[in-house]
Image (cartoon, rainbow, N blue to C red):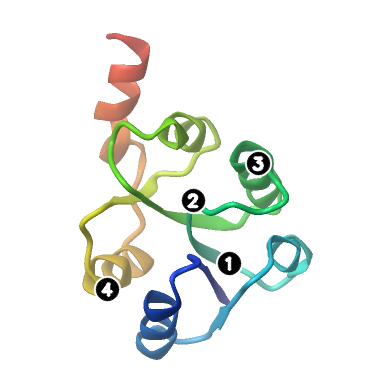
Amino acid sequence: MILIFTGNEQLDKELEQRLKNTRIVYYPDYVLEENEAEILITALQPNKYNFKEFMFKVRQKNIRVILLLENKKSKALTYALILGIYDIIFDPFTIEDIESLVKNPKNFSSVSEYVKGLLNI
């Protein structure tokens, strides 16, 4: 099951149409209570949890996260990398970019340049 939690109604509906076995989610608690989720496609959006807390709880459930970020300077990038989230897409992106990432997960080497920058090495 792929959960779609971007907060962008148009994007959510298009992803739901293009990807198989999906469900649009409107509340963070649903994500945390879902037991069949394999992938969460999400963007930063306000909810009752802060980003770090919410992503930590999602990753504790071993849910793969595809994170949509505005740019490479986002503070969320650091937290995502610490939590082992490597499937990160920066704006501007297309539906095809997200579809490709669902089928072809990134690995550490895909994000190593960002980690290198964070570690100043």
Marks 3 & 4, CB-CB < 8 Å contact: no
Which residue is disc 4 drawn over?
A: 95
Quarter holding residue 81: top left
Q: How far apart are marks 3 and 4 (CA)?
A: 26 Å
Which residue is disc 3 drawn over?
A: 50
Indicate which disc residue 44 carries. Answer: 2
Residue depth check, mark 1 versus mark 2: number of the one nearer the observer: 2
Q: How far apart are marks 3 and 2 (CA)?
A: 10 Å
Which residue is disc 1 drawn over?
A: 38
Using the image, determine if residue 97 lies above or below residue 13. above
Residue type of the residue flagged with mark 4: Ile
Please state the horizontal and vertical placement of residue 90, each as a whole percent of the image: 27, 49
Q: Mark 3 or mark 2, which has the lower sequence index?
A: 2
Left or right: 89, with 13 as reference point = left
Residue type of the residue flagged with mark 1: Glu
Q: Mark 1 or mark 2, which has the lower sequence index?
A: 1
Residue type of the residue flagged with mark 3: Asn
Q: Mark 3 or mark 1, which has the lower sequence index?
A: 1
The secondary structure type at the circle numbered 4 is helix
Residue depth check, mark 4 versus mark 2: number of the one nearer the observer: 2
Q: Badge 4: few (under 14), some or many (20 or more) residues near its Cα, within 10 Å?
A: few
Please state the horizontal and vertical placement of residue 26, each as a whole percent of the image: 63, 72
Residue type of the residue flagged with mark 2: Leu
